[in-house]
Image: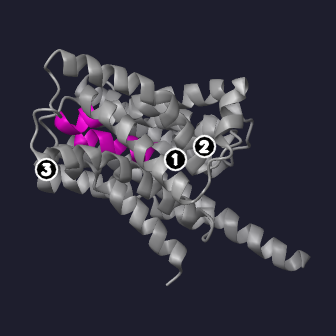
């Protein structure tokens, strides 16, 4: 089997099992968990950079004001996405959170059209319209939009948009983002520590290790994803990515007993149909481009 496929599946399975990890830490408030994730992510990523002797880029990056501005914005969106997701999982909204990552590829296409002036093909327009109908159905039936899903999709879509035009690679970018987030995390952890409200200082060794594991759990799938992206076509990577929200949905329904009635089935069904259309269009375009390249050769 192509190693790239193994790396991709491994990354998306780890992300898909995030609800299990965060549910294990349900006694930790979302903000404290978020601060630990920021802090331990930096510790782990710096260890990886040191092991690879790959830190020469950091000093010039920290001196580049435009780069720092861009990555401050991406770090803010990333931390918002992390915080919303952690809260959603431990508030019993895993199913709704999974919808955000089903919607995200379509948000990316829409953002590309609006902000990068990328051309949308007619099947992509149909997919976006079908997904919008699914969201409209859920809004009408529930009396409110699926805010968690939309917030996750929009924050991650905005994050992807900023990173798409950035000069740094995946690992370097996450390192810079966690460098920028680290002071905020440490100040918050110090404040709750001085107030006697820190769960980390009073926790068992096992719980402390689980909190520290937020570092590798954040960085390892990103490294696997980056390795996969270098080895397999983006169209294949785009299809495999649905492993993550599918596993999250299954965890919410089968492990944690969240409801998935007919209203959700219809709304999610419309969005899944939109994703099928989007995936078909992407695969068709990739095959057409490959045939054209062979003819040109």
For residue 134, side relative to residue 258 (left or right): right
Circle 1 Cα neighbour tier, 10 Å, few/some/many (<14 / 14–19 / ≥20) = many
For residue 218, side relative to residue 26 (left or right): right
Is residue 146 among what the camera can see?
Answer: no
Q: Position of residue 205 (x, y in %)?
A: 13, 47
Is residue 256 among what the camera can see?
Answer: yes
Q: Position of residue 218 (x, y in %)?
A: 39, 48
Label 3, secondary structure: give it.
Answer: helix
Label 1, secondary structure: give it.
Answer: helix
**Depth-wise, is mark 2 or mark 3 nearer the camera?**
3
The residue pinned by badge 2 equals 109
Q: Is residue 73 above or below residue 172?
A: above
The residue pinned by badge 3 equals 206
Residue 95 covered by magenta stretch: yes
Residue 167 covered by magenta stretch: no
Tag 2 near tag 1, CB within 8 Å: yes
Circle 2 Cα neighbour tier, 10 Å, few/some/many (<14 / 14–19 / ≥20) = some
Which residue is painted at 48% across and 62% down in the image? Answer: 224
Question: Which range of residues does the magenta coloring cover?
Answer: 86-103
For residue 113, side relative to residue 78 (left or right): right
**C-alpha span from label 2 to label 1:** 6 Å
Q: Which mark is residue 105?
A: 1
Q: Write down the quadrant of residue 242 in the picture.
A: bottom left
**Depth-wise, is mark 3 or mark 1 nearer the camera?**
3
Tag 2 near tag 3, CB within 8 Å: no
| Residue 243 vs residue 279, the one in the foreground | 243
| Residue 287 vs residue 97, the one in the foreground | 97
């Amino acid at each position: 089997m192509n190693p790239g496929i193994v790396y991709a599946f491994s990354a998306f399975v780890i992300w898909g099992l995030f609800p299990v990890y965060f549910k294990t830490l349900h006694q930790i408030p979302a903000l404290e968990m978020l601060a630990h994730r920021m802090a331990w992510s930096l510790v782990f990523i710096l260890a990886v950079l040191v092991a690879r002797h790959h830190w020469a880029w950091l000093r010039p990056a920290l001196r580049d004001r435009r780069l720092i501005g861009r990555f401050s914005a991406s770090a803010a969106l990333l931390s918002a996405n992390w915080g919303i997701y952690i809260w959603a999982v431990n508030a019993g909204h895993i199913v709704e959170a999974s919808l955000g990552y089903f919607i995200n590829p379509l948000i990316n296409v829409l953002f590309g059209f609006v902000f990068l002036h990328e051309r949308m093909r007619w099947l992509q327009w149909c997919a976006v319209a079908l997904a919008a109908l699914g969201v409209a159905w859920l809004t009408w039936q529930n009396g409110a939009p699926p805010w968690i899903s939309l917030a996750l999709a929009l924050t991650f879509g905005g994050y992807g948009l900023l990173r798409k035009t950035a000069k740094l690679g995946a690992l370097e970018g996450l390192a810079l983002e966690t460098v920028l987030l680290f002071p905020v995390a440490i100040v918050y952890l110090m404040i709750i520590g001085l107030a006697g409200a820190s769960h980390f200082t009073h926790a068992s060794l096992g719980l402390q290790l689980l909190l520290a594991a937020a570092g590798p759990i954040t960085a390892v799938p990103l490294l696997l994803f980056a390795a996969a992206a270098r080895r397999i076509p983006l169209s294949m990577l785009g299809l495999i990515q649905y492993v993550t929200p599918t596993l999250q949905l299954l965890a919410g329904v089968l492990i944690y007993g969240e409801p998935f009635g007919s209203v959700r089935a219809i709304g999610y069904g419309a969005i899944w149909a939109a994703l099928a259309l989007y995936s078909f269009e992407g695969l068709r375009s990739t095959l057409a481009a490959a045939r054209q390249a062979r003819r040109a050769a």
